[in-house]
Amino acid sequence: MDTLHNFFLLLMFLHYAIVSSDGCVKILPDSRSKIPVEVGKNFTATCHLQEESDYTSDDIAWLLGNISIGKQYYHKINKTSVSVTVNITSNMMDWLYCKAARESLSFKKPCIYGIALHSGYPPVKPNNLTCIAVQEGNEISPDLKCYWEPGLRDPLLATTYTIYAEVVYSTTYIGSCNQNLARSCTVYLSTFPFHMSMRVRVEVKNALGSVWSDDLSCLALDFAKLNPPLDVQGLAEKNFSTSLMVTWKHPMDNLLKVTYAIRYCQVDSDVWTEVPESFTQAHTESFRLQSLEPFTEYVVQMRCIQEGHQSYWSDWSANATVRTAEAKPASAPDLWRIIQPSSDNRKVTLVWKPPVKANGKILNYFLRIAQDSGKFERTFPANNLMYSIELPPGEMASIEITAANSVAKSPKATLFIPRSDQELPGVKSLSWLVRDEELQVEWSRVPPLPSGAHLSGYLLEWVNVHQRDLHPHWQKVPHNVNTTTLTGFEKMKRYNVSVYPIYKQSISGRPVTVQVAGRPVTVAAYIQQESPEKGPTATVTKSKKNSAELTWEEIPLDSQHGFITNYTIFYRTGNTEHWQSVAVDANIHSHVLTDLASETDYVVHIMVSTVAGSKNGSDFNFKTMKYGDGEVEVIVVVVCLSFLFLTVFIIMFCLRKREVIKQLLWPQVPDPSDSSIAHWSPDFPVKADMPKEDVSVVEVDVFDGKSLCEEDKAVLPLKKDKYLSEEHSSGIGGSSCMSSPRHSVSDSDESDSGQTTASTVQYSSVVASGYKGQTPNHQPPVFARSESTQPLLDCEEHPDLLNESGGHSRNSYFRRGRELEPGALTQDCEEPNGISLTFCPVQEEEMSPIVEDSPASGVCYMPQQNGYRPQ
């Protein structure tokens, strides 16, 4: 350490001896440019005070940028010098400052001095040095371009790469590249030294040092790289369908001996076949390729290298494409059939593919069909790959097809279609799964085979059901395989995948065996499923009180995008947000919602789901009914029955109470014409010529002992005779004295009990004249008629009026032998010559019978329920 300090002191003294400074401090080492320092190493600098400075070493402080360096990194050399040691990092690009200051001398400006540091790495040795000189025209270019690996570390400092190309015993050529991580550099040779030896090396140098690569010593031609052969072509030869002739030209006019390499492959293939180098001589310019496929396009390329030198291969030439000549087809067409059964005939569509090894361009197909009904042949052009026939269920058919190119016909493909009831068995099961966007299909073995048949393979058929036209795809596999992978499927499209076992069977009467397809087993498959494009639209077909039947159409196949797993019905009332749901199977397209509220609005939509997602249909509104099935009919029937029962009850009640109702609705008014008063005296017959009027008849029994006055019972000789008045008189009925209308009946049972009155009841007063106990004269009765709005009064209801009737009668009346006089209303009803009998209507306010009590005696008749009785 002391030795290091002494070294820095020596440098400091030398520096001050050469460079003068106006400052009071200096730093060693010092430089006007950045000082390169190596990353990861320690760097030591010394701060020295000038002689005229008033500071001491205790006043010195170090700073890196604007950050103070700790005192522990200081080293005091003497009273005027202090050193500091710092570790260099890759991001250290700051100034290192030395500062001299003292607090007691605050009036004096501090002294400060700094140096710039630039961290970096020393250069790295280049590796794998190579140089190359390419062909330009018919010469080798004098530009020698060299390549190397510079290393992974950036030196962080300006670095130069210098190439030294020395021709032995001649000139040294120098090329320079100023890059931190240069990987190549070019040195210009005035003339390419064809047959001379050369030594090439690279020097890498920066501020922290320099390094050399390993020397590269070889002949100059080892650095040369030729161009590929010129005008490479392939020629097809007629009648040689498996070979091609390849021709080319030398790249440098035979100035150099070269070796050629040839490779070829089929078009659209990346598998190349190379011809061994030993098969091509130095001056050869043609070669025949053999063992090729007929009528197949090939790509041919060539390259070359100097013979006898470890130089570089040229680049491959451009592609030369050529097709081999045609040959006879080596395989038969791929024949298949599609059977669509119907009620009468089977529609058989024959489809075929060109031979796999056509060995030429197919020009025609020759189809031969043999049925029970006959044979026929058809010729089709190359673009026709389909033909349909009608085959009855009870017939069989044998089909043969061949393809022809310009050389010859292909082998024939055969197919046998048995009768409908003679189909051979199919496989037991079929399943599929998707792997890497490919459909992997697996099936089980076939059951025991029928006699005379053996399994030759399987045929897998897949059809896009979204296509209207029938475009099947099929693939054949060997008989010992029960799984395969199918490709070429579209996403979100449904395919029907079928497996047919293919048998070879001997047919009776035929010398050869034929291919027969067994019954197919078919499944539907998707290579990729998504959620449906749209949801179903629901409609209500039957809405009831507490239920509703929903129906919806099946989503179109193009919109399903996968297998429908289920439908979910969501419904709620119109005033709530809570949805109720019901899930139904995928094959169901109607459902009955139960436990609904009556007369309520509902909102419903249906969600359709696949394994990949779901889709909701549009909302649909419906309303439940107020009444359920049969409720209206029950209500109508109950109302009708109730009305019927009420009607029958009323009718029965009326029949039972007909007399009361009759009395209430049609009150009976007495008819004087049927009264016994008309027969008061047997000596006077009833006038036959009396005018008749439409009157009510009052029947009076004059000789009823209960009605006559007690003092006249013995003097009346006509006690038991009855007189009827044939005169009709009119009166007015209705009175406040009567509580109900009265009926007028005669003594005879045949009297009219149903006679009614109008609003006015007519009364007749019959007056019989005679003295007490005397027989009245044979004179006709005199009738007095009066009209009143009151009916006859029932005297039995007002017995107190009987005693007052003689002096209070105010109604008009008749007496026998004379007419009623208007002034006689206040007179007594009396006749001096005999009995006086008078009916006197009373006023509207009160109506009472009039009894005339004369010296001769009189009888008063009062109205009663069944007629009039004397009082």
Image: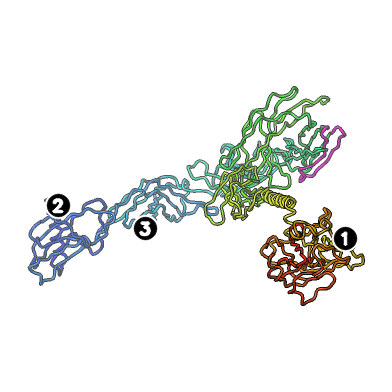
Secondary structure at badge 3 equals loop
* Sequence-wise first label, 3 or 2: 2
Return the residue at label 3.
178
How busy is the neighbourhood of tag 3: few (under 14 within 10 Å), some, or many (20 plus)?
A: some
Q: Does 330 sit left or right of 618 as displayed?
A: right
How busy is the neighbourhood of tag 2: few (under 14 within 10 Å), some, or many (20 plus)?
A: few
Disc 3 to disc 2, C-alpha distance: 36 Å
Return the residue at label 1.
682
Q: Quadrant of residue 714?
A: bottom right
- Asked whether residue 162 is drawn in magenta, I would say no
Disc 1 to disc 2, C-alpha distance: 196 Å
Residue 26 percent location from the top left of the image: 15, 63
Which is nearer the eye, 15 or 132?
15
Say whether marks 1 and 2 touch (CB < 8 Å).
no
Secondary structure at badge 2 equals helix
Relative to 560, is 575 above or below? below
Q: Does 205 sit left or right of 440 as displayed?
A: left
Magenta residues: mostly which secondary structure? strand
The answer to whether residue 510 is seen in the rendering is yes
Labels in figure, total: 3
Kind of residue at disc 2: Leu
Secondary structure at badge 1 equals loop
How busy is the neighbourhood of tag 1: few (under 14 within 10 Å), some, or many (20 plus)?
A: some
Kind of residue at disc 1: Pro
Residue 4, numbered label: 2
* Sequence-wise first label, 1 or 2: 2
Which is nearer the eye, 539 or 248?
539
Q: Which residues are magenta?
A: 371-395
* Sequence-wise first label, 1 or 3: 3
Kind of residue at disc 3: Asn
Residue 485 percent location from the top left of the image: 61, 37
Residue 475 percent location from the top left of the image: 67, 37
